[in-house]
Image (tube, helix red, strand yellow):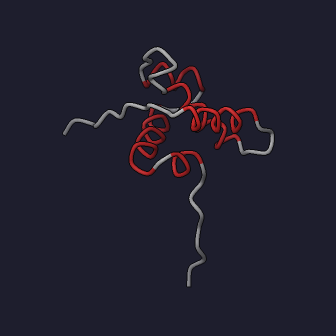
Amino acid sequence: MAKIKYIIELTDQEYKQLTAISQSTDESDRTILRAKILMMSDMARNEKQSVVKLAAQLGTTTTTIQTVRTEYAQKGLEAAVYRKKRTPGF
């Protein structure tokens, strides 16, 4: 079965939010990386880059790039950038 490719088209509001996150010193490295992945994947602002090139440029894996893109397309910006809140087990 072929993998689904998601096209990332950020709104101006989302792009500004991601820019603020990527320049923040309060955010975790993981959060900043995920914000940069989405910004660099935005079709409206950047030329098309392969997953392999983007992973090499950001120093991460292709799986991370695909996971962030998939989460953005399926669950939205917050889910793609921030760590899922854990609930205590019983």
Q: In which quadrant of the rendered image does the N terminus lie?
A: top left
Residue 6 in the image: x percent, y percent?
35, 34
State the image quarter where residue 66 is shown. top left
Q: Residue at x 46, y 22 (%)?
A: 44
- Between 52 and 80, the one lying in front of the other is 80
| Label total for image | 0
- Between 43 and 57, the one lying in front of the other is 43
Q: Residue at x 48, y 26 (%)?
A: 42
State the image quarter where residue 20 is shown. top right
In this rendering, would 66 be left or right of 77? Answer: left
Q: Residue at x 66, y 38 (%)?
A: 32
In this rendering, would 35 be left or right of 8? Answer: right
Q: In which quadrant of the rendered image does the C terminus lie?
A: bottom right
Q: Residue at x 39, y 48 (%)?
A: 74
In this rendering, would 35 be left or right of 74? Answer: right
Residue 25 in the image: x percent, y percent?
80, 39
